[in-house]
Image (cartoon, helix red, strand yellow):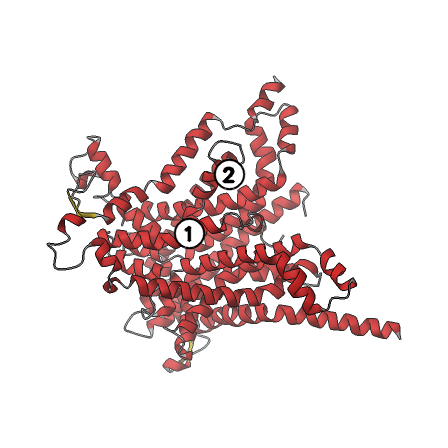
Amino acid sequence: MAFKHVQSLSERLSPFQKFYLIVIAGFILGPFIPLLIQSFAFRWAWPDLLPSTWWLEQRDKSMLPLAWDYVFSPYSRVWEATVNTVFIGSVVTVICLAICLPAARVLARERFRGKSAFEFFLSLPLIVPEAAIGIALLMIFIRLGLAGSYVGIIIAHLIPTIPYMVRMLTAVYQGLGRDFEEQAMILGANRRQILWRVTLPMLLPGVVAGALFTFLVSTNIFLLTFFLGQGQIVTLPTLLFSKISGGTLDASAAGITLIVTLPGIILLILSERFIKEEAFGKGFGN
Amino acid sequence: MTQARHDTMRRRERLRVILQLTPILAVLFVLFGGALVLAVLQSLGFAPWFGVNTFPDFSYFGALWSSTSFWWSLGLTLYYATVSTVIALVLAVLLALALIKAFPGKTFYKYLYKLPLMIPYTVGIALAVLMLSNGGMLSRLAAFAGLIDDPGQFPQILKTHYGWGIIAVYVWKQVPFITLAVYAVLLGIGRETEEAAAILGADRKTIFFRVTLPQILPGIVSSTLICFAFNVGAFEAPFILGGGFPDTLPVVAWRYFNDADYTLQLQGMATVVSIGLVSGVILFAYLAAYRRYEMNMGRN
């Protein structure tokens, strides 16, 4: 009897779990199939399961660029949005690293009064609704002349990225331990040598993971960019928003959706090895 | 002599700690704290740049809270946030439990389940439009199966106050996030306690509710907190997929803010502060309940 229960805990999937994994794969990936088809469609009326006319058939007859022609043309602003997204994401990542590295070192190694309260404060931006921060910041930035500028958007992006970055880097520092730095110190290395020759090389994988994730969070931010960009700076999420805000999705919007998905797929492939799942398991204030 | 040197060293060490924490503190205090304080001040009538300075003035909150549409909006906001967080949690825990098993294609699945986490909400919204609208794929499949013969017969999913489109987008985006947190904790705790319980004769249900669930609770609480707060403050999904008036609170705040009548901006600020207050109270109660549970469990 007991043996049967032990078996039920086996390392293998139950039939329900097998079924469930297939359903989840369908739920996550399924919608991308019609999206891909839609991006090549010219006429796709209800209830056809495939388009009756494809984009390529109409390509030469049309006055205006269609589907992918439109996506890759300057009219769509896809290129501009991509450049903006990458630029903002990179600057945010660099600033975020510079701010969070020293803080993470302290959080991983020092004990001080009010540390848990401080850690809770660092997590707070994750649990304050984004709309509240966005509109409040917009008011300030309009006064300061930062609304609609890159500087304003980059500053705003720091708020949701810092909590993740500092968590991931703290986990990295905790895993590193102090021994190697102490050995280097005993062997006569000075602070700078220790930093560049010992600490940074050992931190590198974790730092890369944190940087990739921060970049990702920044590229995915819609609300802060939309509110603070004042329509003057388009990024991929805000560009897509303007295409679908009417509640319909034509072929060019489907193409743009696919383009907006690409950075995420690239980063997923790059970062899967780096992202420490442990950094997400950490609770709030414990 | 040595004592004095020891003291200076300690003081220098403390100074270094403070210096290293200064940048992060400065950024969060000035930006985040400053924004929140200013939002509260404005909602109470402090806006000298409009020539409005009646601080402290509770009339903006009074006007807002006495309108029925505010309470409808609040109810809708909390409804979408709660329902989607609960559904995402159930799906995510099931997924995490499956992912710790060994199976062919596991590496592929570890990529696959994170995909929605990596892409913007607007992509999720586009997919919802494509799949769930009356002329969308599900409607076509229903027609293909002979269930309906007109798009109008397909049940309206988007642009209703039931908000199943909004909820679908949130769930799609947030299942990976909660799964990641729960899976991380599952990896950390190992399977020894579950095996011990199994050997002692516990059945699967008992093992899950008495052994596994209490251990993954920290991951569940922190990830659902983040998801819930995000859902309360999200703008794009209810804006595109919502049922129109009454809108969710972030959309209401945005409309006030963009109104030609700029005095309504203060009303918008009162809305923003209300969002913060409501979600703050709920999250605080949630955390307090969790702390209490932990105390009763004898942890912490």
Structural distance between the alpha carbons of marks 1 and 2 = 24 Å
In the rendered image, is residue B222 in sight?
A: yes
The kind of residue tagged 1 is Ile
Residue A266 shows which numbered tag? 1
The kind of residue tagged 2 is Ala
Going by the image, does B191 lie left or right of B82?
A: right
Image location of residue A32, percent across then percent down: 32, 44
Residue at 65% of width from left, 24% of height from top? B199
Circle 2 residue: B96
Disc 1 vs disc 2: which is toward the camera? 1
Q: Residue furthest left?
A: A61
Q: Residue furthest top?
A: A1
- Dots 1, 2 in contact, CB < 8 A: no
Dot 2 crowding, Cα within 10 Å, few <14, some 14–19, many 20+? many
Element type where label 1 sits in the image: helix
Vertical order, B118 against B35 (above or below): above
In the rendered image, is residue B242 in sight?
A: no
Indicate the chain on which mark 2 is placed. B
Element type where label 2 sits in the image: helix
Q: Nearer the viewer, residue B63 or B128?
A: B128
Q: Nearer the viewer, residue A226 or B210?
A: A226
Quadrant in the picture for residue B254: bottom left
